[in-house]
């Protein structure tokens, strides 16, 4: 086995580390971890150098030490210490640490309790420093957990902070889904919190995730959500048809204006083009009417969904105040 002597750079770095340079300690840690500059590959020595620099408050060393504890490299695996050192580095503005800690919280990694709000906070800090992985993960986290679409007007469950929806329809569907019934999750969480408080009333603890058990109410809201989706699809189809009809009118008019009308034959051709323009205009008017009707149906379906959701998610105490809502 060939044993390489430490390079001149490594020897100089050791002198700097002995002199108290946290940056030199961190570099030696990296070199021992990778076996660079003639130094033996030794994770124990690497972690020791990272710890020395981290104790001096050196953010890159804190982040590297967090990685050692997370993977159990050179130290005994300890998620609690990994998060502790990772957050120290992240709070100092270390962009990679911000991404890693944000990922741990957002996905519930490293033994931490999943907290989408906390995860997003660190990921946004990292993305602000152009850490591409943070940008990509943030985009992934913005997807609705029910339909998978990238939301614009998003909703996050205010109680658990771990479910994201693009609208109430998706939230309602997901609450009762067979694979991930979010309502049941929040009810259990609420009951556990109440038990810890000594039997306090859980009803006010999770009002935004409460839903009545009446199956007809749930079915009505689900049907209304389906109507909204169908109406939205009709609006999109009508819009495409209307745009196509308008384009056809423009093309027909251009052909009519470009056609000469000097000879008898050319006049007949021009007359046919005029008729084609009129037919295209009639078709465009018809598609515009269909688009308008589809838009009205979509608005009506949305109103019906909101009314149905009121009965599905509003506690009975609120409804008993006498306020009336009509279900479309």
Image (tube, helix red, strand yellow):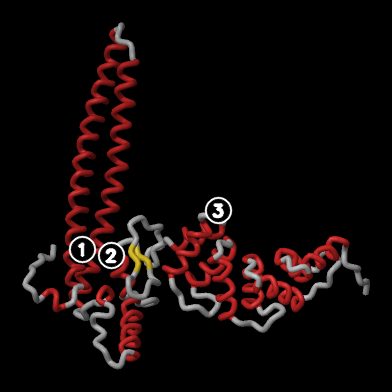
Q: Earlier in the sequence, mark 2 or mark 1?
A: 2
Residue furthest to the bottom in view is: 198
Tell me the tag on residue 169.
2
Name the mark on residue 130: 3
Residue 194 circle label: none
Residue 222 screen position, x and y as percent: 25, 68
**Mark 2 touching mark 1, by CB under 8 A?**
yes
Q: Can residue 34 be seen in the rendering of this structure?
A: no
- Indicate which label's residue lies in the foreground, 2 or 3: 3
The quadrant of the image that shows the C terminus is bottom left
Q: Which of 304 and 247 is in front in this view?
A: 304
> Can residue 148 be seen in the rendering of this structure?
yes
Name the residue at the left extreme. Answer: 322
Horizontal relation, residue 64 to residue 80: left or right: right
Between discs 3 and 1, the one toward the N terminus:
3
Query: Mark number for residue 305?
Result: 1
Q: Distance between the residues labelled 3 and 1?
A: 41 Å
Mark earlier in primary sequence (2, 3): 3
Q: Which residue is drawn at 74% across and 68% down?
A: 20
Mark 3 or 1: the one toward you:
3
The residue drawn where x is 68% and y is 75% is: 51
Residue 280 horizontal/vertical position (percent): 26, 30
Q: Which residue is drawn at 71% across and 75% down?
A: 47
Label 2, secondary structure: give it: helix
Quadrant of the image occupied by residue 259: top left
Q: Is mark 3 on a helix, strand or loop?
A: loop
60 to the left or right of 44: left
In this view, the residue farthest toward the top is: 262
């Amino acid at each position: 086995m060939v044993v390489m002597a430490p390079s001149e750079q490594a020897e100089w770095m050791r002198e700097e580390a002995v002199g108290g340079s946290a940056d030199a300690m961190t570099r030696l840690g990296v070199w021992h971890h990778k076996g660079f500059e003639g130094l033996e590959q030794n994770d124990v020595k690497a972690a020791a150098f990272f710890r020395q620099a981290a104790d001096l408050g050196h953010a890159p060393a804190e982040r590297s030490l967090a990685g050692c504890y997370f993977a159990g490299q050179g130290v005994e695996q300890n998620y609690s210490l990994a998060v502790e050192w990772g957050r120290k580095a992240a709070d100092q503005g270390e962009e990679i640490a911000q991404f890693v800690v944000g990922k741990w919280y957002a996905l519930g990694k490293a033994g931490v309790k999943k907290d989408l709000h906390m995860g997003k906070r660190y990921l946004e800090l990292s993305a602000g420093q152009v850490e591409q992985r943070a940008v990509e993960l943030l985009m992934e986290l913005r997807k609705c957990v029910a339909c998978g679409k990238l939301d614009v007007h998003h909703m996050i469950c205010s109680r658990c902070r771990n479910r994201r929806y693009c609208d109430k329809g998706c939230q309602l569907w997901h609450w009762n889904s067979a694979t991930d019934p979010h309502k049941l999750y929040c009810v259990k969480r609420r009951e556990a919190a109440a038990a810890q408080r000594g039997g306090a009333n859980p009803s006010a603890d999770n009002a935004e995730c409460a839903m009545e058990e009446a199956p007809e109410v749930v079915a009505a809201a689900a049907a209304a959500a389906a109507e909204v989706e169908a109406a939205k699809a009709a609006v999109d189809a009508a819009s495409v048809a209307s745009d196509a009809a308008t384009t056809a009118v423009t093309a027909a008019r251009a052909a009519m204006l470009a056609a000469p009308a000097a000879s008898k034959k050319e006049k007949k051709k021009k007359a046919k083009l005029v008729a084609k323009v009129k037919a295209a205009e009639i078709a465009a008017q018809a598609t515009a009417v269909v688009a308008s009707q589809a838009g009205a149906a979509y608005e009506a379906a949305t109103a019906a969904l909101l009314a149905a959701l009121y009965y599905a998610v509003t506690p009975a105490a609120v409804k008993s105040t006498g306020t009336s809502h009509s279900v479309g």
